[in-house]
Amino acid sequence: MIIDVVATRYENIEAFDGGNFDAYWAVPDSTPGAGIVLLQEVFGINDNMRQLAAELAGHGYVTVVPDMFWRLQRGFESKDESGIQEGMGLAQRLDFTAAVADMTATMRALRAMPECDGRVGAAGFCLGGTLAYLFATSVRDEGRGPDAVVSYYGSAVHAMLEKVGDIDCPMLFHYGDADPYISTEQIAAVEAAVAGRPDIAVHHYDAGHAFSNFDAPSFYQRDAADLAWGRTLAFFDDRLSG
């Protein structure tokens, strides 16, 4: 059932090591339900992320998009490909250990929301696809991790496969077979690493990198984006609803 979004806003989240960071919230008009942590591309919390948050909230999920660049440059945002070099520069400087701590703080804040029933999923794109993988392997609060995670074309996942055994929730991976940033061999390595896990699936698309980003026309491929998004929503509905 589609539910109207009643509130979108920015609010601060307390970091575990001091300070705070902004997060964009999209909250549905519904009884308490599951939450989703949505993880940004190198373009920051832009129109694409805000629209995806609204779509998830419209589907019934309390959704939060944390500013993962806050330790480097607060509020960085690019609306199209013009910001890719600056965004990639920030991504290359991102401290993944600190990022895991910030995602953990985000999950804690989401679970504390009265609209959230405690079940939490995560989805991320590009840089966020790698962060989503780390969300699944490493984000734990009082021993509890996420309940379902989706990673879109995370370009560093293949370099972190030593962590794959730490995934303790169902997971989806989406990859474009024509991605110039992630080779077919790297995708095959991810597939091989999760091959024995019936709760993990890897989907391939006849598409390139960032195929779901409608804010970046040179990357966006509607057919692949729609198919992957439909699978993502069905996955979350199966794992987080009811």
Image: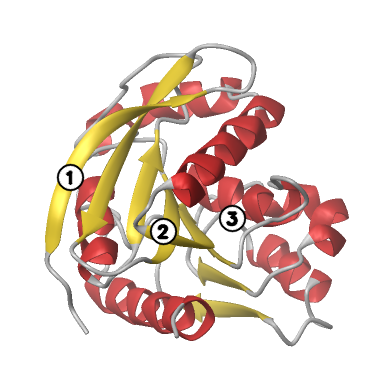
* Horizontal relation, residue 203 to residue 86: left or right: right
The x, y position of residue 147, in whole percent, is 61, 67
Q: Amino acid at mark 2?
A: Cys
The x, y position of residue 163, in whole percent, is 83, 53
Label of residue 150 in the image? none
Q: Vertically, is 220 above or below 171?
A: above
* Horizontal relation, residue 220 to residue 193: left or right: left
Give the SS element for disc 2: strand
Write the residue at 57% across / 39% down. 103
Label of residue 182 in the image? 3
Give the SS element for disc 1: strand
Measure how far apart labels 2 and 3 are at the Cα level.
35 Å
Q: Quadrant of the C terminus?
A: bottom left
Label of residue 8 in the image? 1
Q: Quadrant of the N terminus?
A: bottom left
Badge nearest the viewer, 1 or 2:
2
